Image (cartoon, coloured by chain):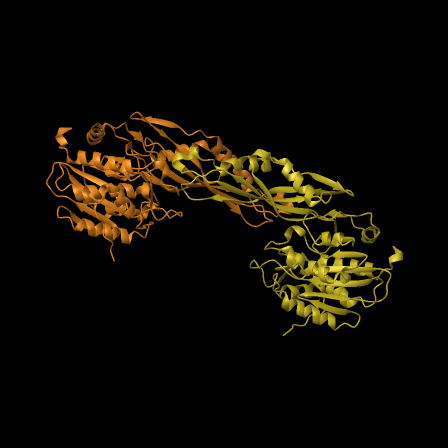
Chain colours: A orange, B yellow
Amino acid sequence: MTPDLDLTADVVALTRVLVDLPSESGAEGPLADAVESSLAALAHLSVERFGNTVVARTALGRPERVIVAGHLDTVPAADNLPSRLEGERIHGLGACDMKGGVAVALRLAAELTAPARDITYIFYECEEVEGDRNGLRRLALHRPDLLSADFALLMEPSDAGVEAGCQGYLEADIVVRGARAHTARAWMGVNAVHRSAAILQCLADHEPERVVIDGLEYREGLGAVAVRAGVAGNVVPDECVITVNARFAPHRSPKEAEEYVRGLLPPSAYDEFLVTDAAPGALPGLARPAIASLVAFLGATPRPKLGWTDVARFTELGVPALNFGPGDPALAHTAGEFVPAEQLRACERKLGEWLRSSPSGV
Amino acid sequence: MTPDLDLTADVVALTRVLVDLPSESGAEGPLADAVESSLAALAHLSVERFGNTVVARTALGRPERVIVAGHLDTVPAADNLPSRLEGERIHGLGACDMKGGVAVALRLAAELTAPARDITYIFYECEEVEGDRNGLRRLALHRPDLLSADFALLMEPSDAGVEAGCQGYLEADIVVRGARAHTARAWMGVNAVHRSAAILQCLADHEPERVVIDGLEYREGLGAVAVRAGVAGNVVPDECVITVNARFAPHRSPKEAEEYVRGLLPPSAYDEFLVTDAAPGALPGLARPAIASLVAFLGATPRPKLGWTDVARFTELGVPALNFGPGDPALAHTAGEFVPAEQLRACERKLGEWLRSSPSGV
């Protein structure tokens, strides 16, 4: 049975209802059902469903179209369900990342029957897992027409402020080889784990750069996220694989980031460098009219987005995009995540005002 | 059906029959059956069976008793069965480690009906796996009377020469801790893999010692055999475990070896040092009369045994012991292992002569 979502309820109450509808990546069905049916009941929206991604649009013939997007999925639970209210904080899985933002978008979808801009609301699946499953990516592949807009807002947690652009990422396996031998005659082999010390020390010593773009400081990152080696307890290991994760400022392409990382490593210290995943970042584009307009309207001081978000996808599609949503991004994916009620209300109020305001009036 | 072993056959033919009777550790049953029934047919031996370990003894009231021991099991096959003869080399699983040695011992058991020394032949199970399953260890626990002797010879591959004593070993997990963080904000965490670089560099830089005892050089070893860390692709890892394997000369106890290894590592570089397995080595004891006697008789120049063998077990039990068997020890556990026919014949001849000779005559 599809539970009812009361979109006229207070945004705090709605957030708690969403948190209490579990939707780990791949299991968003019940939540997508609830979102779809509650939006389908609204006469001013036309609703379409793709897998567990729900798209709802106004078609008022306005001069501008804005996308308001949020993902429905969460990382796995960490003993943080059901939701609970502590003073002004809503705790629980996904409260911060990003059911608070979804609640704000759902409230606006119900409330704004005649906004000054046409709006495409997108509630999508599988943002927290490998890129192939991402609902927004699938929409871009199969229904790019639905992603056509003048501007996109991602309701990702940004402390109810504007986080502009986003950093790119690169994941690679660095393979260090050696030669097996019995440990009783270790000198007859080459220990791949010992050889790896040089790579690890290089990563440990590296001071990531701080890159300033449009006045925003993007703090890069580079480090090992995994290392594995081992044949048997009495065998000198002949291979060690170090998995590195790099976060790079949006002035670099993934290819440039790869060259940058390779350039840090002594070539004699490893045998292969295999890129396993990568995504470009997004430049903040604060000078672009659509972005400048919203930033000015909100009176916000933009901050850089350090993690990767689907802002990069919109940027690639040629749609200027910003992160603007409730919740501290540093709490995302933590067991203790919460979202402040005040930020939910502030986001709903400010975004509602902007969407009601005439584009030419800014 | 128990296959027949023809103990009057040539030692080369017998070695091939043994190789062609697979006996990976834990599956020595058919081979133990064959060994037991062929020895039970000999009137001068009394035979007992314990699991897949077979003990056969003379009881001639001689002034000295000698143990001649070999393990029946092999490591898993590596596409090296059945046996094949190439010129003077017998190839196949276990040919070197140590069915060649077992064939020599079986030939002597059949041939020496009235040796000058009483002999206890031990053919035992599970030498190639964890120590708890070792047939000789089980015999020492449950029937120590059968291990009482003046001297023990292990037919382990020693290139038909004498390898004296053996090195001990120590296996330990070195745990390096950190603090998790999202890789987009890596500076909020502590990367345990990066911290591990200091330990790995220390292992890479270490020059193992060469320890001379009774004129024999024991070349020690210390190195990482495994390393593992990794939480998720976007998480700074909070733990890295480095497994080290140390081979130490027999002048150190396992406790001293542990202190030695710990003393090499900067204390601030790791959080825990957990010993997971250890065994003492065995001093060569070349001055002990029983050992000096055999070495003199063979006219051999003793070499040090670098791997661990059950010589250490006999030494702990107070029984002087030596390794003396056909096959190059460096070929043990390799897919291409073989044993030279000439070494099989030499071992059979020399050992037979010594066992026939009067103890007082040396």
Percent across and percent down for residue A177 are 52, 42
Q: How many marks?
A: 0
Q: Name the one closer to the observer, A16 or A361.
A: A16
A150 to B155, vertically: above or below: above
Please name the residue shown 63% across and 36% down the image: B264
> Is A119 left, or right, of A70 in this rendering?
left
Q: Name the one closer to the observer, A356 or B143.
A: A356
A259 to A139, vertically: above or below: above
Please name the residue shown 78% across and 43% down the image: B214
B288 to A210, vertically: above or below: below
Q: Name the one closer to the observer, A230 or A39.
A: A39
Q: Is residue A331 visible?
A: yes
Percent across and percent down for residue B337 are 62, 55
Percent across and percent down for residue B187 are 43, 32
> Is A76 left, or right, of B326 in this rendering?
left
Percent across and percent down for residue B54 are 71, 66
Please name the residue shown 63% across and 41% down the image: B222
Quarter occupied by residue A98: top left
Q: Is residue A134 visible?
A: no
Q: Name the one closer to the observer, A292 or A22.
A: A22
> Is A41 left, or right, of A280 in this rendering?
left
